[in-house]
Amino acid sequence: MPTLWRDALVLTLDGSPDGVRPRRSDLLIDGSEVVDLGSGLDAPEGADVRDGRDLLILPGLVNAHTHSWEILFRGTSERLPLELWTLVSYPPLGVEPLPDRLVYLRTAIAALESLRGGATAVLDDVGELPTQSPESIEQVFAAYDDLGIRAVCTGAVADIAMVDRLPGADHRFSPALLAESRSALHPSAALIDAYLELSMSAIAAAGSRSSGRIAYAVSPSAPHRCSDDLLRACHDLALDRDLLVHTHLLETRLQADVAHERWGRTAVEHLSDLGLLDDRLIAAHGVWLTASDRRMLGAAGSTIAHNPLSNLKLGSGVLDWRGMREAGVRLALGTDGASSSDTLRMLETVKAAALGQSTTESDLESWPTAAEVLAAATRSGAAALRTGAGVIAPGRPADLLVIDLARDTAFTPRHDVVRQLVFSADASSMAEVWVAGECVVRDGRSTCVDDVALLREFRQEAERWAETVPAIRSANARLVEPAAAAYRSAREADRPAEAHPSTERGIR
């Protein structure tokens, strides 16, 4: 059934100067797409005609980097940098895989929170230990599909031992621990073959879903976590099957140290030498990029998914927003995982992205504007994920947020709705969330599933699973002190500015 909003405030975010200025307009959608916008539109027969005078309608937000599986670890850590957080949050190799039903429930709850927080599309970097299976990733696809959200889901893979992801591993860990870690995970043709087989199965499973909202992407976890052979194999498959490539890139200072220790150059320079920089790459974080790194990424058309909240929680640093923009890097926004940032609500990420630069950059002209941040969270993210959405224009997917301006104090008094959306609004501001022309959330409740029953079942299953968390931490305990020592050394080191770009910007 067509839906026609009369006289709404419409924020198209179409890239034009007018796109960041809300305008009074009718908006007509039919099927999965926007049909028209303008004044005095004719209502098609049978249309649902709505009064839009107190509504703001804008493109849905795009979460360009998250980890749904982390929702099981929410609230389990604080005051930990990434390398230590990983050791208390990631199950070690050899644990039993999660039951398929818990994988489904975990993902469905993440999808529900994402939608309630304003996201109409997500890139979910899915990792399962001891290994991912076709059955588990199909549960991820099913959960996202059932909740009505768009999702690009990855199969995450790595083949470098945990100990070798830290600088100076041979001097920090005992010979026995080095041997044990390297024996548990190491580069091999068999690992690559298994990953490619999994990926082919996942590509077929995603493609078989009739909604058209689900896609698969390859995800070599990070350059310093993957052998060159694995990186190349992932990229070759992406080229052959026209997939996106997701990775983590220079999130922390330790990762910059590992790159120089292993390759004698930055991770971006290494990826460039391997021929792996292109417009299908979505790299999360990018906090410790050099100016040269940024120029290479910009020239290649690659995307950086900025995750301000997890960068703050884990003490990773502050991304150089203006430097990225000046280098032509496409900037999207992500929440990161539900444990590394403890939220999947994109409006919180939008506000953090708008405010973060002011803590480290004295030049106020370099701070991002509210309109810039909102464009990153919509148009840029949608372009990176290839959803076709992210703007409101005829022929584009009808992925929309409908904000009730009258009921929410965030827009009272009403001065600049873009600024108030970025700095004042939260999930309570949203009346409806639409994906592909369907209203999937209304007044905070899913229209697709019984969200109360879903939450009840998830709580029961998650409580049983939580009993395994102490064992996970115990299994990783031997790595904690060497990792902490590596972190302290990195913080104390006086690196050249070009090797550590945040130092040149006065970020400590």
Image (cartoon, helix red, strand yellow):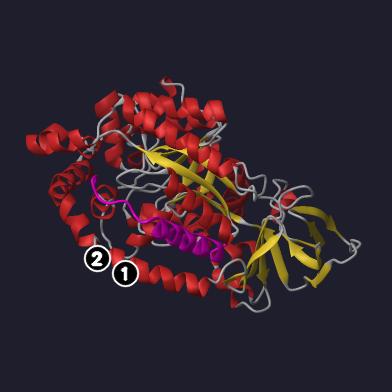
**Range of the magenta residues?**
92-118
349 or 282: which is nearer to us? 282
| Amino acid type, callout 1 | Glu
Give coordinates of residue 165: x percent, y percent.
25, 37
x 33%, y 48%: residue:
316
Q: In the image, is residue 51 above or below residue 109?
A: below
Q: Circle 1 sits on which residue?
A: 463
Give coordinates of residue 500: x percent, y percent.
32, 36
325 or 333: which is nearer to us? 333
Q: In the image, is residue 270 above or below residue 379?
A: above
Give coordinates of residue 56: x percent, y percent.
70, 66
Q: Which numbered circle lies on residue 277?
A: none
Q: Main secondary structure of the magenta part?
A: helix
x 77%, y 55%: residue:
31
Circles 1 and 2, Cβ within 8 Å, touching? The answer is yes
Where, by quadrant of the figure, is residue 132 drawn? top left
Decide: few, some or many residues near mark 1? Use Cα within 10 Å; few <14, some 14-19, many ≥20.
few
Can residue 184 be seen here?
A: yes
Q: Tell whether position 464 is magenta.
A: no
Q: Which numbered circle lies on residue 467?
A: 2
Q: In this rendering, would 5 be left or right of 385?
A: right
